[in-house]
Amino acid sequence: MSSSSFYRKLWASIHKREIYIVAFLVAAISIMSAPLLNPDGLEMAQVGQCILGLLPIELGGCDAWQPLYYPPAFPLLSGLLSWVFGVGGLFILSLMAAGMLVRPLSRLVEGLSGHKNVTAVLAVTLLSISSYSFYGMLAEPRMLFVFALFSVWSMMLKSEGQRPSRQPLFAIGVLSASLMLIRPEGILVGPLLVCYAFWRLGRRGWRVAAGLLVVALPWWGLLSANSGRLTVSSRSWELAGVSMLSYLPVRPLVQLWGVGASERPMREALSGLGPSQFSGESGLFDSLLSVFSSLAGNLPAPLLVLAIIGIYLSLRSSDHRHISVAMGLVVIPSFALSMTPVGRDVAMPLNNLLPVVFVLVVYGVVGMYWLSTVIRRRMQVSNRAAQLTLLSSIIVGGLFTPYPNSQLYWPQSSESGLMAASWINENTDQSETVASTFATSPIAHLSQRPWRALPSRWDGGSWSSEEAPSWFVVSAVDGTWPINSPMFRREMNIEPRAIFSDDDGWALVLERTASISIRP
Amino acid sequence: MIVKARSQVFFSWLSLLLALVFGVSKASGALALNTNVPSSLGTDLPANIQDATEGWLRNGDADSLSRSRIHTMTGLAAAWLRGVDLSKTNSEALAEVSASSNSQLLISELQVSQLYSRVELGVLISPAVLGRVRQLCPESPVSLTRICDDEWLRASKQALRTHLFDLTETAVEFAAEVRLGDSDLGLEAANALCGLMSGDVAFYEEAYERVTASDLGTRQHSLGVMALSCAYPERSRSYLLDLVGSRISGDAMVIAALELARVYSHYGGDNLGLGTHINSAIEWATPQQAAALSVAAQILEVP
């Protein structure tokens, strides 16, 4: 057998097995999790369709959105995919990214443990984590970001073992920069990777830096030109807004802050100020405690124990120390973000900790391989039996961790929300506008009607009779503030038209009309 | 051999494609709209919502409204309260709807003391409903007869005010975005305080004394300022302007500036003095305070 055919066969055999596993993961995630439309993810797709000129005119609103508010990779890709495949297309990126994540994670486990063919074990471990399947069916860019993050680091670590002429360092730099086009915190990944490259490769690290700048400079230039000042992130104003947490209650702050890509007064004012100091009621220790309790409360306990073993072993081994340094650099941005008041999410505590979760999975599998070897030697059982026992313990532990979806009400994915969307679709004219808060906007979007944001308590002015929406939808996630808004009271005569409720919440459809008349 | 390997690779990719098609189809199916949804459809409620509304508000009683689970749908109750001709409603039913239109966390917290019934709380917190019930005295239903007793009403409002003030100290952790539900009890208490004060100047003056006596920069003071400004924006203006102009008011000036800006954005009027106050405060404020003050200035500039 010639060497070229050997490599071709090797390539085919490796990829075929892994592709089967990726396919298994995609199918398993689809079965295990219900699809969840995130208001941000849905709006990103629409912004992407606006940029691509694909959004139907009647569903417009493109002029009200800031195309650069969201990093553009997910909006463009999900906009295109949802245009081709409909609402189901919104989930393709998350599903594929979740499935393919097993590849870079496998390379890291192999590098740390020395074992080969770890993909199947890793796949089962991933499925035992409820957050994995949850984010795999959540239409937003977090899973795509995590996949890209681990792919870049996996490539970087692999390239260290290659001949200098074969190292794809420039491409690695380009890919690391592309992370900032997926999620705002991606801006931290590239510089950390460059530092690592200089540490490990010396002057060749410049190639990574050059690749990074080739993508980053045009992006930063575009952002700066758009905002009229030097800026490297379209979300930097949010950092300035964090300081307001110590002044305002949360709900008015969120209304003032504004969500989504539409203009809000606070965003306008803050965008010119740049980042300011974080403030909040909790200190560094409280923040760290909060992060650790989120991880401990949402991951299988056996996996955490095995991860601690894996981390200990990897730090002891000088051969693997550089991989542990790389993993440390992976978790730094997540930790930094999760320790800010805005980075902590009461309802979905692992939102900004996903990279940390998967680093723990990597070390958990490393710890599992080591412990299974110990068990095999001490108890005279087969290696397979020892591994299956440990894997089972992780799976059982996973059954006792909460599913993220159970902690919050999703009007857009609830039965009541879908019924409200169906009701609007069936009983309103296609040109009629539906107004709601940003959180409830997916109901309006699903109903295939143009959407308008409800004014917050800070928005003055009034809608003229021509521009005032005919329909409103309010859900349990809103509470009563939309209806109690002074502007609403002054301008509108609204009447409840339909109410849908389920065990989790309710969605109410209202029509702007004459006041309810009580017949004598 | 190579052909076999290639076909195996092909099948592996095919399996991935099929898995993806399955996932996308499942997602599309789960989010598909129901067709032929009649306009009268609405779970938990009679088919004709308007008839039900009219019926309940004219003839209903608190028990039947509670059984209909209105209190689980605060948005619906709040919507029902607007546009309704109060003179033609059943006051007991109206009181229940009023209670339902508030945060249920707050209502249950206020009921802990057992000093008031649910419908009494609905009346006490809503000035419009209180006015309607007082008009009907002394023919009010049994459940609301205490409202007609001036002394009881005065004492109850004062006790309720104290309780609500205490609740404004309740802290809440920041939750990302808007997944908040009824979680901010302090803010809900401040909203109820606004309702309690509205239409009763003497009562407002007492609340004003209480707010101005509380420590600057505390959550209780911030929410108190917001409640005062909500109930009587014009009367509160001078105090809020003082806060903005005072170097010792600390973070309280931020709340005051934002409240003044909010009131201006809703009710208009002369903002010249306000803009001057805010701009001069920006000059000596800390960077964080200046950032927040510039937001208030920005709100003033929106046409």
Image (tube, coloured by chain):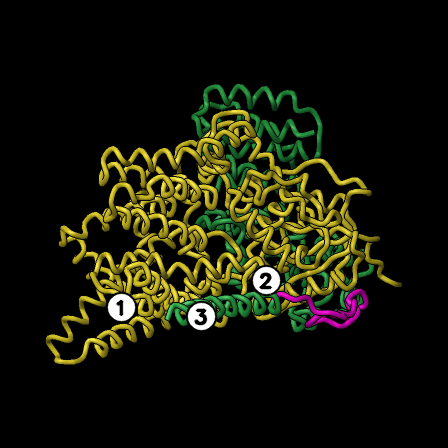
Chain colours: A yellow, B green
How far apart marks 1 and 3 lie (CA) works out to 40 Å
Quadrant containing the N terminus of chain B is: bottom left
Q: In this view of the protein, can residue A250 be seen by the observer?
A: yes
Q: Are marks 3 and 2 on the same chain?
A: no
Query: Which numbered disc, 3 or 2, marks the residue closer to the eye?
Result: 3
Chain letter for the residue marked with disc 2 in the picture:
A
Q: How many marks?
A: 3
The magenta-colored residue range is B31-52
Q: Are marks 1 and 3 in contact (CB under 8 Å)?
A: no
> Which residue sits furthest right?
A520
Residue at 54% over, 27% down: A225
Q: Bin the neighbour count of mark 2 within 10 Å (Cα to Cα): few under 14, some 14-19, many 20 and up.
A: many
Residue A88: mark in rendering: 2
Q: Which mark is residue A302?
A: 1
Write down the residue under mark 3: B7
Which quadrant would residue A118 be assigned to in this image? bottom left
Q: Is residue A30 above or below residue A278?
A: below
For residue A339, above or below residue A121: above
Q: In the rendered image, is residue B199 in sight?
A: no
Q: Main secondary structure of the magenta part?
A: loop
How far is disc 2 from disc 1 in space, using C-alphas? Answer: 35 Å
